[in-house]
């Protein structure tokens, strides 16, 4: 069964459950064969969050839907307010202040 579109917790949770059930019945998720159920759950979470367009915090925090444009704009204003010059990291997304 295909994954449901949407970014609500209920939809994401349902998609994770669908992928884990597929792993338990077929032993694989798509063309991938995770070594254990724990690995399958991690992969299912990643797939579901990617489908929903949601980012997971790095340190095991809660799931959040980040709006990078607002964050970048506020960081840029803060750097300029302190009299710094705004440059960007290699990926070109996050501003870095040079004082």
Image (spheres, rainbow, N blue to C red):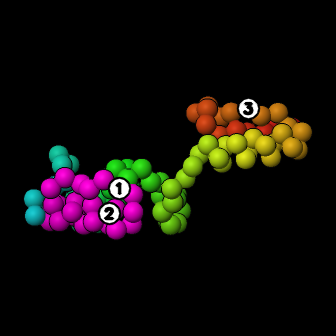
Q: Is residue 19 magenta?
A: yes
Q: Give the foreground label among 3 and 2.
A: 2
Q: Which residues are magenta?
A: 1-24
| Residue labelled with disc 3 | 87
Residue 32 locus on image (x, y percent): 20, 49
Residue lying farthest to the left in this orientation = 26
Q: Which residue, given by chain and number where applicable, does mark 1 sit on? A: 6
Using a 10 Å C-alpha cutoff, classify the residue at mark 2 as few (fewer than 14 neighbours), some (14 to 19) or many (20 or more). Answer: some
Q: Position of residue 19 (x, y in %)?
A: 22, 60
Residue 41 visible from this viewpoint: no
- How dense is the environment of label 1, judged by Cα within 10 Å: few (below 14), some, or many (20 and up)? some
Secondary structure of residue under mark 3: strand
Instruction: Give the residue drawn at x 58%, y 33%.
Output: 91
Q: Sequence-wise, which precedes: disc 1 or disc 2?
A: 1
Spatial distance from mark 1 to mark 2, Cα to Cα?
A: 6 Å
Query: Disc 3, disc 1: CB below 8 Å?
Result: no
Q: Considering the numbered disc 1 on the image, is that residue within a helix, a strand or a loop? A: loop
Which residue ends up furthest to the right in the rendered image? 83
- Left/right of residue 54 with respect to residue 15 in the rendered view: right
Distance, label 3 to label 2, CA atoms, is 39 Å
Q: Earlier in the sequence, mark 3 or mark 2?
A: 2
Local secondary structure at mark 2: helix
Q: Which residue is mark 2?
A: 11
């Amino acid at each position: 069964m295909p994954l449901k579109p949407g970014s609500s917790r209920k939809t994401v949770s349902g998609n994770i459950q669908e992928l884990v059930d597929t792993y338990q019945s077929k032993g694989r998720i798509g063309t991938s064969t995770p070594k254990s159920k724990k690995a399958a759950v991690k992969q299912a979470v990643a797939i579901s969050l990617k489908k929903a367009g949601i980012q997971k915090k790095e340190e095991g925090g809660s799931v959040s839907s980040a709006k990078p444009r607002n964050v970048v704009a506020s960081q840029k204003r803060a750097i300029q307010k302190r009299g710094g010059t705004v440059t960007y990291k290699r990926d070109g997304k996050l501003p870095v202040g040079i004082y």
